[in-house]
Image (spheres, rainbow, N blue to C red):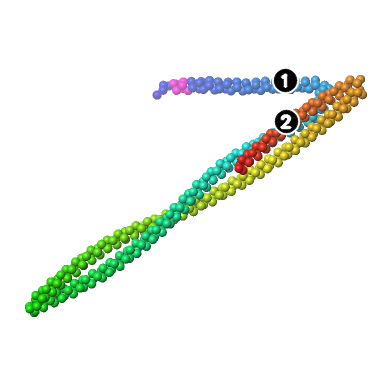
Amino acid sequence: FFRAGVLANLESERDEKLRVLIIGIQALARGKLAVENFKKLIQQHKAIQVLQRNGKCYLKLRNWQWWRLFTKVKPLLQVTSRDKEILEREEELKKVQDMHTKDKKTMEEIEAQLKKTMEERSLLTEQIFREKEMAAEADDQRVRLATKKAELEEYIHDLEERIDSEEEKNMKIMSEKKRVEGTIAELESSLADEGNARQKLSIEKQQLENKLKALEDSLANREDNISKMTRDKAQMDARLKDTQSALIEEEDKGKALTKQKVKLETMLQELEDKLQKEEKAHEALDKQKRKLENTIHSLQDSLNDKENRVAELQNSLDKTMEDVARLTLKSEDDASTRSNIEKKMRELENRVSDLSEDLEAERAAHKRTDKLKRDLNEELQKINN
């Protein structure tokens, strides 16, 4: 839908824009690289100036008498080694402190875990005691239900025996009724032949009918008793079924309680195993305490050695002072020897002052180690308590 030449014009404008953008990006990159190279050249120039200045200073000072004396005396000084020893002791002390903090944290964690396990153990023992009481109650209830079941079975057996006896009596009554009916039929048949004895027989018939009615009434009463007994039997059967179901439920409860008891006993065994592990960790901490005490004793021994060295240096200083006094008496006219002796005295005094500072630093370190030892002992006493 473009005209002819419009698309070519757009592409040329696009190429022009891209060319301008690429030229700008290249200029920025070249400028940044030029700035970085310029900074490097400045740093190199400064480094060359520093090297040249130090070289000139060395050329000026290498023939200076004091510089030669310093270069000869410096290897004899032990200040640097003392500084290194002090730094090493400080690093060892930091390591000991870090170990102490770690041990303290682990002891706190172990104490918290031990407290938690003891609480869990007390709760489990209480729960086990309650479960045992419930199991005992269930056993008692099961025994009561069993006795009740036996009593009901005996009562049902008595009822069955009574029902059987009543049925036997009913059978006897029915047989007697049939016999009476047979006699009545015989009497009615004999009435046709014996008209003269009809009144007598009618009287006997009336008596027999009365007797039959009495027997029928007694039979009805027996039947009522039998129906009552059957109803009582049905009720007893229902009660027996209820007691049997209750007994089955109590037995299921007892089984569940025994299972729960076994589960709680296993949990208690696991807690006892955890307690043994924590006691082993406590023993490991005691071993670490003994190691720290050994390191403290070694630091104490090194401090005593340094104090002895300081005393020896003090004695050597006193001897040099005596030598200086003798030399001053002998060579009062020799100024150069006097100046050398004074320099030596100043150097020895400086050395003694440095050694005294080292001794004070060692004493401070010893105090810190003693304090650390006391703190460790107090914490271990608290942990043991």
Q: Residue at x 91, y 21 (%)?
A: 332
Q: Earlier in the sequence, mark 2 or mark 1?
A: 1
Instruction: Give the magenta part as a residue range.
Output: 5-12
Q: Is residue 17 left or right of residue 179?
A: right
Instruction: Determine which quarter of the picture holds residue 110.
Output: top right
Front-most of residues 180 and 27: 180
Rounded to the nearest angstrom, the CA distance separating label 2 from label 1 is: 41 Å
Is residue 96 in sight in this rendering?
A: no
In percent of width and height, residue 157 lies at 32, 65
Identify the image quadrant of residue 22.
top right
> As drawn, which residue projects farthest toward the bottom?
193
Q: Is residue 266 above or below residue 313?
A: below
Mark 1, secondary structure of its residue: helix
Residue 29 x/y as whole percent? 58, 23
Which residue is drawn at the image coordinates 82% and 27% (left, top)? 348
In the rendered image, residue 376, in percent from the top left (x then y), is placed at 65, 38
Per the rendering, the mark at residue 361 is 2
Residue 147 in picture, x, y percent from top left? 38, 61
Query: What residue is shown with label 1?
Result: 49
**Residue 11 is a magenta residue:** yes
24, 143: nearer the viewer: 143
The quadrant of the image that shows the N terminus is top left
Chief SS of the magenta region: helix
